[in-house]
Image: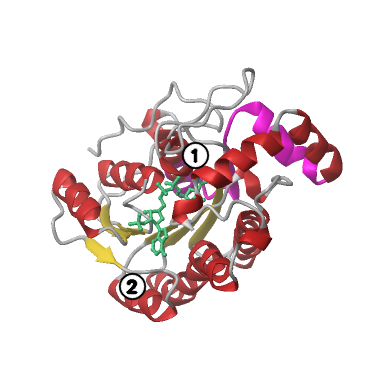
Amino acid sequence: MPDTALVKPGSRGHRILSVASAPDLTGRSALVTGASGGIGGAIARALHGQGCDVLLHGRRSDVLEELAGELGIPAAVAVADLADAGEVARLAERAKDVDILVANAGLPGTGDLADYTLGDADRVLDVNLRSAIHLTHALLPGMLERGRGNLVYISSIAGKTPAVGASLYAATKFGLRGFALALHEDLRERPVGVSAIFPGFIADAGLWGDTGLALPPGSGRLRTPDDVAAGVLEAIATNKAEIDVAPVLQRSGGWLTGFAPRLVAASIRAGGGERISKALAEAQRGKR
Ligand SMILES: NC(=O)c1ccc[n+]([C@@H]2O[C@H](COP(=O)([O-])OP(=O)(O)OC[C@H]3O[C@@H](n4cnc5c(N)ncnc54)[C@H](OP(=O)(O)O)[C@@H]3O)[C@@H](O)[C@H]2O)c1
């Protein structure tokens, strides 16, 4: 029996699977991009815990090898810079037989656009969006031919709301949302599931957690990398098109943006959004 302990019934913020309905992934295989990061590591552990063979992608080979050692899968490391289309193609070739793609790797893309060189801006687009599309283009035909597969994209609540001070990041995360929603429809009668996950600010590790910044009181309990991983398992089990992993305040911004984007932007500003986004961009400058 696969270990289902990582699907925490106590977690909140998206519809959590009951432990009994967590997917048995024995005999299946997955590529997790950005497995060297806070959220990607949790996703890789969760998939592996369900019996899945996982190919761990990232750039920091030492971190990937440590994770592979922890999971007992020493050969399952794939290093590739997703800003380089040639390296993405080589990664796709290595992963061509996987049943599951979790396109998770991402750069922050925070701060004013004017602070970016065009090269830095392109890197955010390439890593966060283009690489996910290229990997899908390469892996989807094999999944369709084998008659099974799941494509899971890690977007962000910033892919549903007018994020203040993060126009590049928002462009990629809205882009992933559009791509995933449209692909979900295109494949609705085919045996390949397509889901997008929308984490809010994630505590403990990752792009937000690593900064040590705090949100104002009343922002709700921040979700963790394990909560995002539970969302990925839920996506694989249910083929839901969209799964939010965030407190209700952040999720409600996503729901309301379709009706009143400027109202949502105003409420983000009123809640200190500009101050937080400036501090975030400064803290993440080294990751551009
Ligand atoms: N943390 C949050 O609050 C939050 C909220 C919403 C959405 N998300 C999304 O969740 C995903 C994971 O983020 P995280 O928080 O886990 O961040 P993280 O800890 O910084 O991890 C980012 C991952 O992306 C990889 N990556 C970055 N640039 C790359 C490149 N050029 N080529 C290949 N890999 C690259 C990193 O690999 P190396 O470190 O090995 O280079 C790392 O594994 C991202 O898509 C992010 O946008 C995060």
Residue 199, image quadrant: top right
Report the disc number at residue 208. 1
Residue 268, image quadrant: top right
Left or right of 255? Residue 278 is left
**In the rendered image, is residue 104 in sight?**
no
Q: Quadrant of the N terminus?
A: top left
Left or right of 90? Residue 161 is right
Q: Secondary structure at mark 1?
A: helix
Left or right of 195? Residue 218 is right
Asked whether mark 1 and ligand 1 are closer than 8 Å, the reply comes as yes
Q: Position of residue 248 (x, y in %)?
A: 65, 27
Residue stretch rendered in magenta on the structure: 233-259
First reached walking from the N terminus: tag 2 or tag 1: 2
Report the disc number at residue 91. 2
Q: Position of residue 225 (x, y in %)?
A: 41, 37
Q: Secondary structure at mark 2?
A: helix
